Each structure stands twice: as structure tokens, then as C-alpha cells.
Amino acid sequence: MKSVRIRRINLQQKEININDEFISSLVEEGQPVILENTENLDMTENWTVEKLCEKMKDCNLSIHKGGNLTLDFRTKNFEYANKYPAADFLCEVASGKVRYLRSTGARRKDLPDFEKDYPTLSSDLNLFKPERTHSQILRISPKDLEIWLHYDTLDNFLTQTVGEKEVLLFNPKDAANLYLDGDKSECIGLISNLKENLERFPKLFQTTAFREVLKPGDVLFIPALWFHCTKANNFSVSINTFFKSLPDKMYGKDLYGNRDPLPVEDAAKHLQKAIIALKQLPPTYQHFYFHKLGISAACLSDNNNSK
Ligand SMILES: O=C(O)CCC(=O)C(=O)O
């Protein structure tokens, strides 16, 4: 596995303001980048655990609760707990218990809107909001909590406000070597247990890992479809902003920022029809024509599995 560091841009040195024009240039470039030396995004002093308990005292949260710091969405080694008093959650996180907040909207079907949902926090910082923002999500983790490797279909700014967070990203071009199951990877704990993962999943050797440690005030741009996992080095508070960069008509209703664009869903339906049509033929013809039409063996076995 090749390892490279994620490029950093010092906003003050380069006299850059984060505005929609600058954001468009990042999207066009399509590479992850860390914006550093931002104004008023380091909340180390303002958001100590005690101060957060006070600011969030009226909040009841929906959280992830488990016993293993390496969270795995595929095997669900955690459960969801609702109406969790924020003070209890924060004390447990501070003492290293396996708890994780990925904030939801005010009602479950609402998109998370950090500014509106957490006014006592959002008034503390200068969080920029791209014109085509989809949702803004508050994320709180204990030391050493690692989030599974996955991709999202929206572009994303991950703003680190308290604590340090290690991030590991892969280019979408590496998808074939990342052992995918839907939008998640079978490789779990890539940051904490890289050696074990390389032994079990040898195609990882062919990938290039983009790595860095986010510090309070850093903003990581994660382009759509880039795989990412993160690990908090200590008590961590981040906010991530999903925004759209494709034409509006290409996005369906999507609470989590990971629904495939509508043309992809359309293409998948056509592909299913093609597979069903070819399956009318004897096996020798099937293999010949699947190959000729460039339909991969993976599609074929997916189709077999679903039967
Ligand atoms: O660092 C985290 O808590 C998860 C970040 C993430 O997956 C995202 O912003 O999409």
C-alpha cells in the first residue's frame, strides 16, 4: 500500500476566503485537501466537556452505543439508543465508553441541520455553508473510536473543532481493491489494525492511502465517492457538511448523503433487465455474451445471490 499525505492549504497565507467560487474549484480538482488556519473553527476552549454539557443541557440525542471502539456498520456491532440525555452521553464519551453521535434532524425524517438543531453551539463558530448544502451533521466521538470505511455520494467538508482525528482516504479508482459490500468496505479498523487488514485483504497492497491527522480548526474536503474512515485520537467534536455538485435533477430523496445518483439507479435497473434476458440462454452462451457485453462476473454473482 502506497501512502501519501493529504495536501494542506493555509487559508491565511494564501489569502483565500471559503466561498462558492473557491468550493467549485475544489470540486473540479476532485482531490482531498485540508484547509488550515481557518477563522474561529477551533473550539478547544469553548467546547470543553463541561461547557458542552451546559450548552446541550436541553438536548436528547439519538446515538450509537456499543462495546467495541472499532465500529462496523455491516455487522452492526453497536445499537442505536434514542432520547439519550446529552449530559449522560457526553460524560460517557469523555470517560472513553463506546458511544458515538451522528446527529439526526429534529424529527427522524428531517435532514440534520446543525445551525438550526444546535443553536447554542452553532452561534459559537463561523461555519460556512455552501450554496447547495444538503445537511450539516454534528459528530462526537470518544478517544480511539474508529468509523468504518465507506463512501458518500455527496461532496463533503469535515470540520474538526475539538480534538485530533486521523483520517484515511482512498481514490474511487481504488474501488476494485477495497472489498466493497454496497457503499461500505469489508475492511474494518483500517487505521487501528492495518497489518491484520493487509493480511486478510491482500488487494489493499495495490491501493494508495491518503492520510493525515486533523487538528482543531482544520477542514477536510472529501470529494464525493472518495472512500474514507476516521479515528479520533482523543475526545472529538466534528461537523460535516454535505453539499451537492451535480445538477439537482440527479439527486433523489436522501437522508444520509449516500444514495446513488438517479442515473446510476436507472442504469442498475437496466442492468438487471439485461441479466434476466441473458439468463434465458444456456450457460455457454451466457458466459460468452456477459463477457462480450462487458458485464462483470461480479454482477452475475450478485444476481445469483439475490435469487
Ligand atoms: O469522523 C466521523 O465521525 C465520520 C466522518 C464521516 O464519515 C463523514 O463526514 O462522512
Image (cartoon, grey):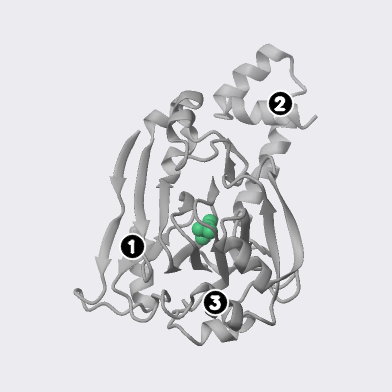
Secondary element type, mark 1: strand
Q: Is residue 77 above or below residue 301?
A: below
Percent coordinates x, y for residue 18 in the rendering:
35, 77
Q: Quadrant of the C terminus?
A: top right
**Which sits earlier in the primary sequence, circle 3 or circle 1?**
1
Measure how far apart labels 3 and 1 are at the Cα level.
Answer: 29 Å
Placement of 249 over or under 207, stated as above or below: below
Badge 2: how crowded within 10 Å, few (<14), some, or many (20+)?
some
- Examine the rendering and report whether any part of residue 31 can be seen: no
In this view, the residue in front, 131 or 109, is 109
Q: Is residue 254 left or right of residue 11?
A: right
What residue lies at 56% left-to-right and 22% top-to-bottom? 291
Q: Nearer the viewer, mark 3 or mark 1?
A: 3
Answer left or right for 172 relative to 65: left
User: In the image shown, does 209 or 258 lie closer to the viewer?
Assistant: 209
Q: Which residue is mark 3?
A: 50
Graded by Cα atoms within 10 Å as few (under 14), some (14 to 19) or many (20 or more), the crowding at tag 1 reads: many
Q: Is mark 3 within 8 Å of ligand 1?
A: no
Asked whether mark 1 lies closer than 8 Å to ligand 1, one says no
Q: Residue furthest right?
A: 307
Mark 3 residue element: helix
Which quadrant would the N terminus be assigned to in this image? top left
Residue in the picture at 57% in, 69% down: 137
Residue 40 visible? The answer is yes
Give residue 102's quadrant in the image.
Answer: bottom right
Kindly identify which residue carries mark 2.
278
Amino acid type of the residue that numbered disc 1 sits on in the rendered structure: Ile
Q: Quadrant of residue 273?
A: top right
Residue on which disc 1 sits: 34
Considering depth in this image, is 276 or 45 the residue closer to the camera? 45
